[in-house]
Amino acid sequence: MEQRISLVTLGVTDLARARAFYEALGWRGQEVQETVFFQAGGLVVVLWGRAALAADSGIEDAGTDGFGGMALAHNVRSPGEVDAVLAEALAAGATVTRPAAETFYGGYAGCFTDPDGHVWEVAHNPGFTLGADGALTVPDFGAS
């Protein structure tokens, strides 16, 4: 298996509400057969009904809310951008779960959840350089 992720699919309870939230953040999606696709750099974020996603994955959706053991991350180029993105998310209907603050690694980050409870971290990490296209490349942690 090649080391990459092509799509991240978020199970949502209300597709129209979820699409409106992400579009309020400035994302532009395409809806096809009750599924919304957003090009997000080199991968695609998909919104799909939670029950349909669970059935398609061959699992039973327990319907529980709360932390699902996963967080999405959006890295930015400056601490000011962290504040701006968190404010934009709040205005779009997000819940800020961790206000922006300095981090243990010398960066600055905060978190929000979308209307379906998916966790997003917004972070500025001075050790992670972003390319002009927003692509993040993991640094060589063994280099001195």
Image: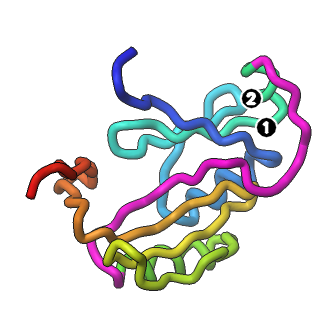
Please say which color scheme the image uses.
Answer: rainbow
Residue 70 location, x and y as percent? 61, 48
Label of residue 78 in the image: none
Q: x, y (%) of residue 38?
A: 50, 42
- Residue 76 lies in the magenta-colored region: yes
Three-letter residue code for mark 1: Arg
Q: Distance between the residues labelled 2 and 1?
A: 5 Å
Q: In the image, is 138 to the left or to the right of 34?
A: left
- Depth check: give the residue in front, 64 or 80: 64
Q: What residue type is labelled 2?
A: Leu
**Which image quarter is the N terminus in?**
top left
Q: Main secondary structure of the magenta part?
A: loop
**39, 124: nearer the viewer:** 124
Q: In this view, does 28 lie above or below 45?
A: below
- Residue 50's tag is 1
Asked whether residue 30 is in view, the answer is no
Residue 88 in view here: yes
Relative to 121, residue 28 above or below: above
Residue depicted at x 87% and y 27%:
60
Give 19 or 112, whichever is nearer the viewer. Answer: 112
User: Residue visible at 49% across and 32% down?
Assistant: 7
Element marked by disc 1: helix
Residue projecting furthest to the top: 1
The 10 Å Cα crowd at callout 2, few under 14, some 14 to 19, many 20 or more, is: some
Q: Residue at x 66, y 74 (%)?
A: 97
x and y percentages locating residue 128 in the rendered image: 25, 60
Disc 2 designates what residue? 53
Query: On the rendered image, what quadrant is the C terminus found in?
Result: bottom left
Q: Dot 1, crowdedness within 10 Å: few (<14), some or many (≥20)?
A: some
Q: Is residue 131 left or right of 100 when viewed as pictured?
A: left
Q: Magenta span covers which residues?
A: 58-80
